[in-house]
Amino acid sequence: DVSTTVAGIRLSTCIYNASGPRSGSAEALHKIAQSSAGAVLSKSATLLAQDGNPLPRTWQHNDASLNSEGLPNKGIDYYISDETISEILQDSSSSKPYMVSLSGKTTADNITMLRRMVGNTKIAAIELNLACPNIIGKPVVGYDVEQMKDILDQVTQILNLPPMGIKLPPYLDSVQFQQVATLINQYNWIQFVVSINTLGNATAVSIEAGMPFISSNDGFAGLSGPAVKYTALANVRKLRQLLRPTIDVVGVGGIATGRDVLEFLLCGAAAVQVGTQHWSEGPKCFDRLVQELSDCMTELGHESVRSIVGTLQPW
Ligand code: ORO
């Protein structure tokens, strides 16, 4: 049984797409809905549509990818409209949850976008992205506890939102984990956290060109892919240890095989997202990963995903 629940929402499989790659249009999201993915998650929306940073803004190589996309997206009203949602979920089982990611350029923009989703029952959940590393001149909210508290306080004022989660950047220091988990635990409306966004401000260098591969943001970009898997596993594990048990942890970072999924489940992920692998392989990756996870569970004698979550044993 590869099903799970996140924030009380049933996912027929515990694997779905990360916000970002192949998630910006109804057409792309429809392909995810038609696959074995357990949910469909939009690209992070801003208040207004925008083109993002100049090209080239992505780079891929074996175990690592970089992006400095700068949140290209069609604007919040597109992702929450009845028309878009019907197009995404057409001919798929009506139970596949559609989730919307938000990444406002300011706290006020996030609040405005959230107000537009009050009472919208077609949106299964909202992922509030506090971790975009690529907006030039803007800090990562998740690294600034004061700014994070301010936005979380303001969201608390909005009633009747769909189930809410927040997306976090990777943390590296145990004091950071403590501070952030203590803050998050104070908000009853937070039902899940998604960990991790890309590791910010990485650079890949072309020795032929003598330049960074990425032009935007002076070649500084978010790192993803198998290179970040170990950081992601540790973040999921730490957050599972520190967050109250009623908050689900959704793991993301470098998943390329069914075995990787099992590692995240053991560390405490209730579900996982796939970004870089979805980008390179396309939506058929969800069918392959679900099959590999299922085979791996059979081999190891696991009957259900839920019975694996957080069962990593101490030495
Ligand atoms: N890139 C990321 O790696 N994470 C985000 O949250 C957003 C972007 C982007 O659009 O640049």
Image (spheres, rainbow, N blue to C red):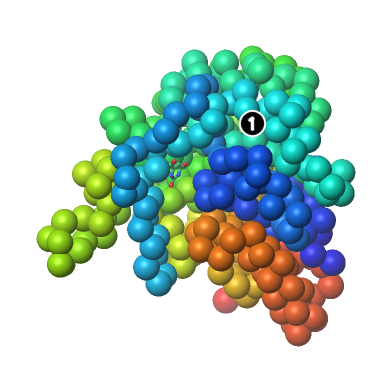
Q: Give the labeled residue for mark 1.
A: 79
- Horizontal side, residue 268 vs residue 14: left or right: left
Q: In the rendered image, which quarter is residue 120 located in?
A: top right
Q: The C terminus appears in which quarter of the rendering?
A: bottom right
Q: In the rendered image, which quarter is residue 271 located in?
A: bottom right
Residue type at the position of mark 1:
Tyr
Give the percent coordinates (x, y) of residue 31. Answer: 69, 52
Give the percent coordinates (x, y) of residue 296. Answer: 72, 79
At horizontal 70% and vertical 26% (from top left) the residue drawn is 81
- Horizontal side, residue 167 vs residue 247: left or right: left
Residue 248 or residue 13, whichever sits in front: 13
Residue 6 or residue 211, whichever sits in front: 211
The residue sitting at the right extreme is 94
At horizontal 26% and vertical 41% (from top left) the residue drawn is 217
Mark 1 crowd level (few <14, some 14–19, many ≥20, 10 Å Cα): many
At horizontal 45% and vertical 36% (from top left) the residue drawn is 72
At horizontal 31% and vertical 49% (from top left) the residue drawn is 56
Residue 305 or residue 97, whichever sits in front: 97
- Horizontal side, residue 246 vs residue 259: left or right: right
Could you tell me if residue 159 is visible in this image? yes
Could you tell me if residue 38 is visible in this image? no
- Does residue 228 lie above or below 171 as drawn? below
> Quarter containing ligand 1?
top left
The residue sitting at the left extreme is 210
Give the percent coordinates (x, y) of residue 9. Answer: 80, 43
Kind of element beneath mark 1 = helix
- Does residue 147 lie above or below 190 as drawn? above
Q: Is mark 1 within 8 Å of ligand 1?
A: no
Give the percent coordinates (x, y) of residue 225. Answer: 46, 63
